[in-house]
Amino acid sequence: MKTVMIHTEFIKLGQLLKLAGLVDQGSDAKLLIASGEVMVNGTVAQERGKKIHPGDVVQVKNGETVTVALKEEGGC
């Protein structure tokens, strides 16, 4: 299982798939999602722009699992 750290409130699903190295480009993410091979928190994802928040779990039918965590801003 991979963990992707983000510093914002959310990341879009297509961006997450690219950041996690599961696809090379946005069009690949679109095809993967359209084929029903991506689930978010156990539900099949249907849109590349779905907002993924810290704590969400994304699974791809090839067996890859990605969790999203919030990167804490450090220091004063």
Image (cartoon, grey):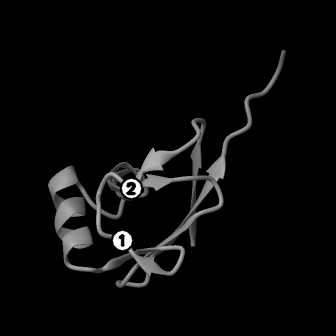
Which element type, helix, strand or loop, lies under badge 2? loop
Res 67 → quadrant:
bottom right
Q: Is residue 68 left or right of residue 38?
A: right
Would you call the spot at circle 1 few (<14 residues within 10 Å), some (14-19), or many (20 or more)? many
Residue 68 on image: x %, y %: 58, 57
Question: Which amino acid type is shown beneath numbered disc 2?
Answer: Lys
6 above or below 23?
A: above
Judging depth in this view, the residue of 72 and 2 nearest the camera is 72
Whether residue 54 can be seen here: yes
Which element type, helix, strand or loop, lies under badge 1? loop
Labelled pair 2, 1 in contact (Cβ < 8 Å) = yes
Residue 46 on image: x %, y %: 29, 69
Q: Which residue is mark 2?
A: 50
- Tell me which residue sits at (36%, 71%) in the image: 45
- Tell me which residue sits at (32%, 54%) in the image: 14
Q: Which residue is mark 1?
A: 45
- Tell me which residue sits at (15%, 56%) in the image: 27
Q: Residue farthest to the right?
A: 76
